[in-house]
Image: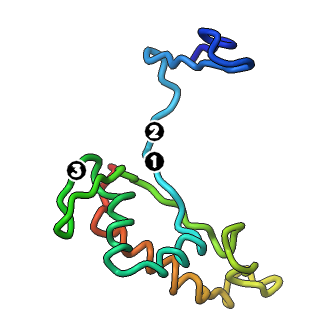
Amino acid sequence: MSYCRNPHNLAPNSLALTPNEAHKNQTIFGFGGAFTDAAGINIARLSSNAQQNLIHAYFGPEGRERFEKSIILGIGYTIARTPIASCDFSTHNYSYDDVDGDFNLSNFSLTQEDFKYKVRTISFRRPFLRSHS
């Protein structure tokens, strides 16, 4: 990777990165988003058809695909992260086991947000799962 400051006088303090394709440092596994409480809440507010179209638009194959009598351009997301318990996109703070010293996780329990939003939204992605072996 090489870089230069203010390439082609485009903008002050700009920086151009030029990848060196002969020297590979890492493999890109995929691109994606996150299944947060906020995403689940907003998706749940959509109609069933709009929910399917939205998930297809993110996780559907890149290019034009026929889906539900319409043509939707998918962007081909291949991965999605899910926060463990609450995050900055949750409506309140929560964890899965607040009992001090419970190293066996005897009091571990998923929350209403997980079942109502995260698990439900993740299940919409099922038709687009691909093997990455």
Secondary structure at numbered mark 3:
strand
Q: Which residue is mark 2?
A: 28
- Residue depicted at x 45% and y 35%: 27
Of badges 2 and 1, the one in the foreground is 1
Q: Position of residue 42 (x, y in %)?
A: 53, 75
Residue at (54% x, 17% y) in the render: 18
What is the number of the mark on residue 64?
Answer: 3
Say which residue appears at 38% left-offset and 66% top-offset.
54
Asked if the residue at tag 1 contacts the one at tag 2, i.e. Cβ–Cβ closer than 8 Å, the answer is: yes
Q: Name the side, left or right, on which 19 lies relative to 9.
A: left
The amino acid type found where label 2 is placed reads Ile
Q: For mark 1, what is the residue?
A: 31
**SS at badge 2:** loop
Mark 3 closeness class: few <14, some 14–19, many ≥20 residues within 10 Å: few
Q: Is residue 61 left or right of residue 93?
A: left
> Disc 3 marks which amino acid?
Arg
